[in-house]
Amino acid sequence: MKILIGINTLTEVGQMVYGNHMQFWFRLGRDTDYEFIFFAPRRMNIDNMRNMAAKLAIENECDYLLFIDDDVLVPFDTLQRLIACNADVAAGWTVIRGYPYLNMFFRWVGGPDGEKKNLENWPDPVPAPEMLECAAVGFSCCLLKVETLKKLSTPYFITGPFNTEDIYYCMKVQREVPGARIVVDTGVLTQHMLDPEFVSAVNKKQLKEYREACDSAINVNSQPAPETHEQQEAKIGDRSLPTYESVLENAIFGAAK
């Protein structure tokens, strides 16, 4: 089995993350028979990096593409557990590193007609350890089947004005690969670096309470309500202009297919 590991290093790797990742790589090399390709390019846009990693994984005939962010601690059995999920997209349990520390995996919220309307962060409490079927997941710690990648149109990842590249990929998989499965293994408990502490499912309640106490003490106003879908659509503008998607596709995959 061949696996490409992609890490996007934006600036520098924190000391604790570096130590965790070094132990993780060492144990993978010692305890598994997998063949690994390590891809950690110079700083670039996250969707650009992920598209390049996907292209390399296909060209090198890899079985899986593993993404781990440069600010996340991972359990040492992460790869084995995510492979065991046997899903097109399998992620660990990561918490967004910003107040109010929401879970970085999502489910559909239906409208009055029962249709799938919007995504929402999976609410607490989250059962653990358990494999949950999701609408989308963040890619801070995520395993993709390369077999599924090959079925998709390019580019695979797009960071848009109102979406992240990982959510874009999950939506693309569901549109273009009928029956595709997206899951999170809540037994793969990552830790997301703050400054200098880490946030995870274990301590996020305490961090949230601390943040709220601080905000209350200095009389910080609450954040404005998020824009509606209609307001977001109104900002997109002239759709006749070249799209970021088309520019990115030509840059990475070439104009000719």
Image (cartoon, rainbow, N blue to C red):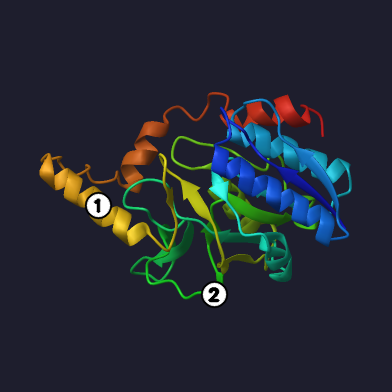
Q: In this rendering, which labeled residue sits more in front, label 1 or label 2?
A: 1
The dot on residue 168 is none
Three-letter residue code for mark 2: Pro
* Dot 1 alpha-carbon crowd within 10 angstroms: few under 14, some 14 to 19, many 20 or more: few
Q: Nearer the viewer, residue 45 or 179?
A: 45
Considering only vertical position in the picture, is 242 above or below 182?
above
248 lies left or right of 199: right
Asked whether 102 or 80 is in front, the reply is: 80
Task: Report whether residue 66 is seen.
Answer: no
Q: Residue at x 44, y 40 (%)?
A: 162
First in sequence, mark 1 or 2: give its number. Answer: 2
- Give the residue at x 58% y 60%: 92
How many marks are shown on the rendered structure? 2
* Secondary structure of the residue carrying numbered label 2: loop
Determine the image quadrant of residue 256. Answer: top right
Q: Which mark is residue 129?
A: 2
Query: Hey, what amino acid is under mark 1?
Result: Tyr
- The residue positioned 38% from the left and 72% from the top of the image is 125
In the image, 156 versus 71, the foreground residue is 71
Percent position (x, y) of residue 165?
56, 42
Q: Is residue 45 above or below residue 28?
A: above
The quadrant in which the N terminus is found is bottom right
Quadrant for the C terminus in the image: top right
- Residue 60 x, y percent position in the rendering: 88, 43
Which residue matches tag 1? Answer: 210
